[in-house]
Amino acid sequence: MDSPAARPHPAVPPKAGPSPAPVKVTVIVASARHGRLAPDVSGWFTALAALRDDLVLDTVDVADRELPGSLAALDPVAVALRPRLAAADAFVLIVPEYNRSVPGPLKTLIDSFQSEWEAKPVGFVGYGLSLTGGVRAVEHLRQIYAEFHAVGMKDAVLFPRVLEHYDAQGRFPAEPEGAEAAAKLMLDQLLWWALALRDAKSVRPYGV
C-alpha cells in the first residue's frame, strides 16, 4: 500500500489575481478638412471599441480644437492638452492618406509633444481613396512615433477605396465583419503592449 507521501498531489490551479485597471486609450482624429470622412470612420471605431470593458476612451479631434502655434513647452494650447495625452496608456490614430503621407494638422499635433508619447503603444486606422487605403500614411507614422520611443502596432485597420465602404444608405462600413475583425486584432495587440508597458513603468520609469 502506498504511503501518503508517495501519492501524487492533485494540481492546484493558481489563484486569479485582480483584473487590471482598464487601459486608457486616446483616439486622435487626424483630419480637419471640410467634407472629411473622419467622423464616419472614427464614429464606427469608437462605437466598436466602447463595447469592450478592458479600455476607456478619450477622443481628441484636430478639427475641434486649436493647435499649438509653437514648439515651446509653455505654449498655452499645448499646456491645456498635455494632461490628456500624458494620462493615456495608448493611442489610436484615425488617419487619412493625403498625398502619400499624413495630414498637416496631425504632424503639428505630434511635434508639439514629447514625453507624452514615450513608451506607449500606438494603433492605426487608415483610409484613403486609393487602393493603398492609408497604408503610406500609417507607415510614415510608424517612423515618426519611433522617434518618440513609442511602439507602433504591426496590424492596422485599413479602408482602401474608402468611398466603396459605404452602402446605398450611406452607412459605414457597408460590410463590417472584416473591419471588426481587424479592429479586434489591433486592439488586442494594443492592450497587451499597454498593460506590459504600464506595469514596467510602475517598477522603473522609462529612461531612468
Image (cartoon, grey):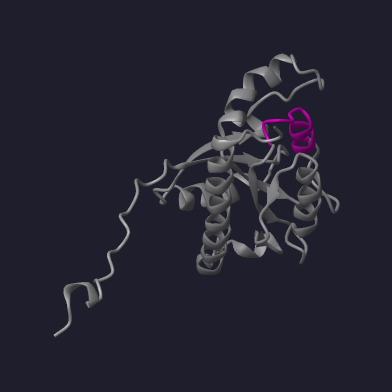
Q: Nearer the viewer, residue 129 or 42?
A: 42
Asked if residue 45 shows in the view, the reply is yes
Residue 71 shown in magenta: no
Most extreme residue toward the right is 99
Residue placed at 75% from the left, 44% from the top? 145
Apparent side of residue 102 relative to residue 117 in the rendered image (left or right): right
Q: Position of residue 157 (x, y in %)?
A: 63, 59
Apparent side of residue 13 relative to residue 131 in the rendered image (left or right): left
Residue placed at 67% from the left, 18% from the top? 79
Q: Position of residue 38 (x, y in %)?
A: 64, 46
Q: Quadrant of the N terminus?
A: bottom left
Q: Specify the quadrant of the image occupied by residue 61.
A: top right
Asked if residue 172 shows in the view, the reply is no
Q: Nearer the viewer, residue 205 or 4?
A: 4
Apparent side of residue 186 relative to residue 140 in the rendered image (left or right): left
Residue placed at 68% from the left, 44% from the top? 36
Q: Quadrant of the C terminus?
A: top right
Residue 106 to residue 37: above or below: above
Residue 136 to residue 43: above or below: below
Q: Position of residue 108 (x, y in %)?
A: 79, 32
Most extreme residue toward the left is 1
Residue placed at 52% from the left, 52% from the top? 44
Count of numbered marks: 0
- Please report the bounds of the magenta region as a residue range: 105-117
Residue 110 shown in magenta: yes
Q: Position of residue 189 (x, y in %)?
A: 57, 57
Residue 31 to residue 72: above or below: below
